[in-house]
Image: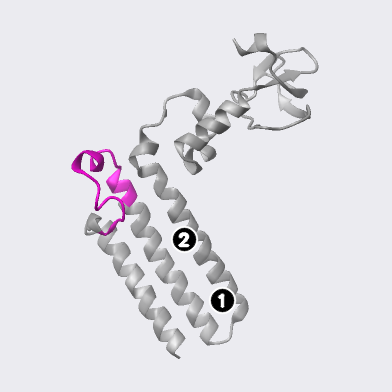
Amino acid sequence: MITLITGIFISIVLAILGILINHYKYYKLIAGYNRATEEIKKQYDIQGLAEHIGNGLVTLGVLLIFSVVSHYYGFYSWFKVFFGLFIFIALVIIIGTRKFMPARRNMRTSSAVDAQHPFLYWLLSSSAYKAIENGTRQWLQVCKKCGHKQDYWEAGGVRGGGIGEPVKLQLCENCQKLRMHKIRRKTESEFI
């Protein structure tokens, strides 16, 4: 019974915090933003961040209620589902907040290359993203039919620190057909 009451209390607190942040603009409840200087605060997408965190906290509150109620009444398989969703949504909230923060928003966003890797762009810090890009740019994708070469990063691939030269089925920019491509390291002359 104590677990049920505690779970419902925490759920209500999460939901109230989410509503305060999202609908009543209590931005001072957002860690990091509340202690930032005014200059840094201007760089945040604060409406997007508040909506993301607020909706996420309300969702966590609802999932927590379902989790504790299903556990209390002995529906353990449902408890596992709801608690698993709770953990997943919590991770999504934590990782997703990065795209509203200043360092993420100041990163190159208009580049066509970034459009090839939106998930990495969303998920990683700018330094990690740049490191993966630099590692992948050391590789080429070469069509085995026509010999067309393309930077592997620009082709949408990700490869860093890999060994060997795999062969993959890819769309050839030149042939405009699915062709086998060899993925290999660039030679010194190909870095230009």
User: Could you tell me which residue is drawn at 64 percent across and 22 percent down?
Assistant: 138
Residue projecting furthest to the left: 38
The vertical placement of 180 against 55, above or below, is above
Looking at numbered disc 1 in the image, what kind of residue is underneath it? Answer: Phe
As for residue 86 lying within the magenta part, the answer is no
In this figure, what is the number of numbered marks?
Answer: 2
- Residues in magenta, as a range: 29-49
Tell me, yes or no, whether the highlighted magenta stretch contains residue 41.
Answer: yes
- The quadrant of the picture occupied by the C terminus is top right
Image quarter in which the N terminus is found: bottom left
Q: Amino acid at mark 2?
A: Ala
Q: Picture coordinates of residue 31 (x, y %)?
A: 31, 55
Mark 2 neighbour class, 10 Å CA radius: few under 14, some 14 to 19, many 20 or more: some
Which residue bears the numbered disc 1? 79
Q: Which mark is residue 90?
A: 2
The residue that appears at 56% across and 76% down in the rendered structure is 79
Image quarter of residue 105: top left
